[in-house]
Amino acid sequence: MWQNILLNWKTSASGFAAVLTALADVLHALSAGQLPNFEADIPAIVSGIGLIVAKDSNVSGRAAR
């Protein structure tokens, strides 16, 4: 799995950015004593995970491991 993340760094970087942004939003809301915006944060985390495990479009022909 880690080799796939390194080979597909563009989509993985986008996924990590989405997950980190959503987690930062959750932590910011909790530290302010508010409820996080779960309607936006949960889909962002799920989409980010999908991007992390996805394959770049210009890496066709390589088998995902």
Image: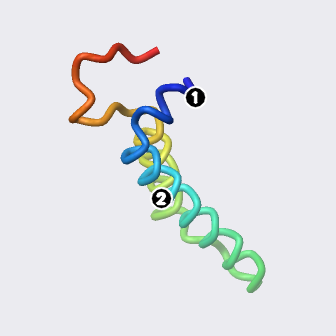
Q: Above or below — where is 64 with respect to 49?
A: above
Residue at numbered disc 2:
18
- Measuring 53% from the left and 26% from the top, which residue is drawn there? 3
Instruction: Identify which residue is drawn at 45% across, 44% down.
Output: 12
Task: Residue 38 in the image: state x and y as whole percent.
Answer: 55, 63
How many angstroms separate mark 1 from mark 2 (CA)?
18 Å
Q: Residue at x 74, y 75 (%)?
A: 30
Q: Compared to 19, does 26 lie above or below? A: below
- Residue 11 x/y as whole percent: 38, 45
Residue 48 image point, x, y percent: 46, 48
The disc placed on residue 58 is: none
Q: Is residue 56 left or right of residue 25?
A: left
Under mark 2, the amino acid is Ala
Q: Amino acid at mark 1?
A: Trp
- Secondary structure under tag 1 reads helix
Numbered label attached to residue 2:
1
Q: Which element carries disc 2, helix, strand or loop?
A: helix
Judge whether 23 appears above or below 34 on screen. above
Mark 1 and mark 2 lie on one chain; the one further toward the N terminus is 1
| Image coordinates for residue 24, horizontal then vertical, percent | 63, 70
